[in-house]
Image: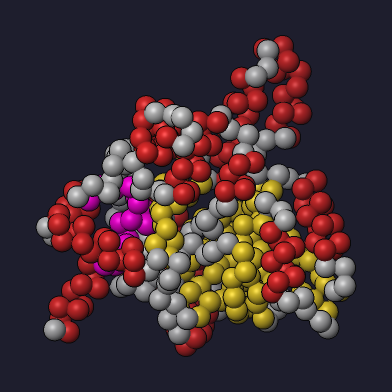
Amino acid sequence: MAEKTHENLDIEKKILSILGANARISINDLAGEVHIDKNKTYEVFNSIVEKYGIRFVPEINIDALWHMEFARQARLQTKRSIIGEAEEMISNVGFSEYLMQIKFDKKTPNNDELISTAEKEYWIQFLAKTHGNYDALAYIVARPYDDLRYIISKLGAALKNYDMEISISKIWPYFGFFPLSKSLISQLKLFETYKNLLIGLLNAGRENFSEMGKEYGQGYTQMLYSYDRLYRTNVLKRVTYYETKPNKKAYEAVSIKVTNREKFEKSKEEWYMHIIEQANKGKQLYVYACETVAPFGNFVILAGESTEEIKKEISHISKLKGAKVSGTHIDQSLIGALGIREFDMRYSFQYEYLESRNKVPRIQEAVQKIEESPNRP
């Protein structure tokens, strides 16, 4: 019986890992990947969707958005005006990603105050209460420069009864994602068919295109074209998922401040190998990772089944040379969600990094088939 249970968990992990990289895979292809009967695959699929509260959503490449926004803006201009206004147009397209950390002095606002403040603005995609080096952590998507000043000004006005230090750092994500909000996607300066496709995927990432398009008066062909175009331009990295009922008990935000770049770069290889080997053994502790400017270094979010598991991983990270490591406990998510999922690490940045140094076998990511009705058994 125990052996049977272990086997079922292995199948679950395998299916989740595949869905993390390609959540619109058909049941037929999924069955072929896990080498079990199609009907059994469909049964397990439905079971894990319920068990982990899975939501299928698009993973959007924020860095690639400006190309598509510029294309739409340019389409509306004459050739002469494009040349004359190109500089102004470029400054008003695209978004950047930021981490915001807030440390309150003496007294801290309650959850309702923080939520009501954050909900008013579309920029804040994730907000959590923390304790340790700071009291609140937020992931922000905003247009550069002026938006940040506006965000800080609005926060200061909304929380005027509290003294606080606000730190915002531009980030370059390289692993994981935060699910984006409908309010943010609605702000994108994309062609309406593209935006409708992204909102449709946000509402139900495995819905068939015909049903998805009905709400917007668009047919299967329009939705299919939009999907193909966004995927080929890397705006849509993939359709993936996140767990709303994860089997996680402890969450930690870890700052890795680089003090000696040369030493850090040499030890990073071993760290990446550790992350991949750990995930291959069924322990995917890393939810998110990015590079930061201030402080210069890396920032990661860990999620584990126990505090001891997280402490052990922080201890491992602390062995990195040329870096200072510190952790802040994440107590509660207030706005948005962490993108907790299983993920096939062969498609990760860490694997690509090691692959370029001939440390792991070379692979080529399969071109995803565009499935009209992936849920059909």
Does 357 appear in magenta? no
Q: Quadrant of residue 364?
A: top left
Is 119 on the left or on the right of 177, as rendered? right
At a point 69% along the width and 66% down the height, the residue shown is 115
Is 172 on the left or on the right of 377, as rendered? right
Q: Between 181 and 93, which is closer to the camera in this rendering?
A: 181
Does 18 appear in magenta? yes
Residue 190 in the image: above or below residue 181: above
The N terminus, quarter of image: bottom left
Percent across and percent down for residue 126 are 61, 62
Residue 47 in the image: above or below residue 76: below
- Is there any visible trace of residue 267 in the rendered image? yes
Percent across and percent down for residue 146 are 80, 46
Q: Quadrant of residue 213?
A: top left
Q: Between 66 and 42, which is closer to the camera in this rendering?
A: 42
Q: Quadrant of residue 343?
A: bottom left
Q: Main secondary structure of the magenta part?
A: helix
Percent across and percent down for residue 66 are 61, 36
Is 162 on the left or on the right of 373, as rendered? right
At a point 81% along the width and 51% down the height, the residue shown is 150
Q: Give the extent of the magenta segment.
A: 12-27
Q: Between 184 and 70, which is closer to the camera in this rendering?
A: 184
- Is there any visible trace of residue 266 in the rendered image? no
Percent across and percent down for residue 307 are 49, 86
At a point 31% along the width and 51% down the height, the residue shown is 362
At a point 81% along the width and 81% down the height, the residue shown is 107
